[in-house]
Image (tube, grey):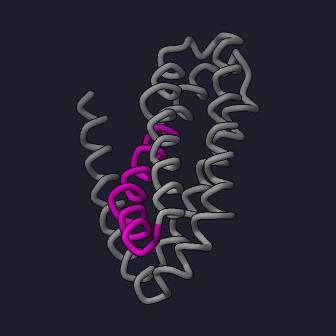
């Protein structure tokens, strides 16, 4: 699978989890905790794939315009990974505050996904070409598999 198709499939999975989280009620605390764990895993692994494989290739192949896009995307990742997601994880899933924070996470991620899919990915297709994207996709599949094993091992121990 090429890198962009793989990342788009991840985006759909994340949007699905966010939709379920948004639709959940304050009484469904167990479901909310499970969905939040799943969301955290998907986002953590997806971010690594982008930041360690696609983004550097995109930045290297591009010019100043791609540099700006690269840094903006990385900053959006940092905002979700370092600020918004940790706050959400510390919020009681049985409260209206949790629902409000889920809404903000959903809006941030949907904005990020839309920018990548409408701006960055089409440029990456042009700059990198099919063969390079296929090669990056193979690297991503291998990394994703390894990350999921690591994640499972570290969360089984916890």
Image quadrant in which the C terminus is located: top left
Vertical position of residue 30 compared to residue 142: above or below? above
Where residue 150 appears, as percent x and y from the top left, is 26, 48
Magenta segment: does it hold 44?
A: yes
Where residue 80 appears, as percent x and y from the top left, is 51, 34
Q: Nearer the viewer, residue 93 or 63?
A: 63
Q: Determine which quarter of the picture holds residue 142.
A: bottom left
Range covered by the magenta-colored residues: 38-63
Q: Residue at x 59, y 16 (%)?
A: 93
Q: Nearer the viewer, residue 29 or 91?
A: 91
Where residue 70 appears, as percent x and y from the top left, is 47, 56
Decide whether the magenta segment is chiefly helix, strand or loop: helix
Q: Residue at x 31, y 44 (%)?
A: 151
Where residue 131 appears, as percent x and y from the top left, is 43, 89
Vertical position of residue 119 compared to residue 123: above or below? above
Q: How many marks?
A: 0
Q: Residue at x 49, y 86 (%)?
A: 129
Q: Nearer the viewer, residue 43 or 65?
A: 65
């Amino acid at each position: 699978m090429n890198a962009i198709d793989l990342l788009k499939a991840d985006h759909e999975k994340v949007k699905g989890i966010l939709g379920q989280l948004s639709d959940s009620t304050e009484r469904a605390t167990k479901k909310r905790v499970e969905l939040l764990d799943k969301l955290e895993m998907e986002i953590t692994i997806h971010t690594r794939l982008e930041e360690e494989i696609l983004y550097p290739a995109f930045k290297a192949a591009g010019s100043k315009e791609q540099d700006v896009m690269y840094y903006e995307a990385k900053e959006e990742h940092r905002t979700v990974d370092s600020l918004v997601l940790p706050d959400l994880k510390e919020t009681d899933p049985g409260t209206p505050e949790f629902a409000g924070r889920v809404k903000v996470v959903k809006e941030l991620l949907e904005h990020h996904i839309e920018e990548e899919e409408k701006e960055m990915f089409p440029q990456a297709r042009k700059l990198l070409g099919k063969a390079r994207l296929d090669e990056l996709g193979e690297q991503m599949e291998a990394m994703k598999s390894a990350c999921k094993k690591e994640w499972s091992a570290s969360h089984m121990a916890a």
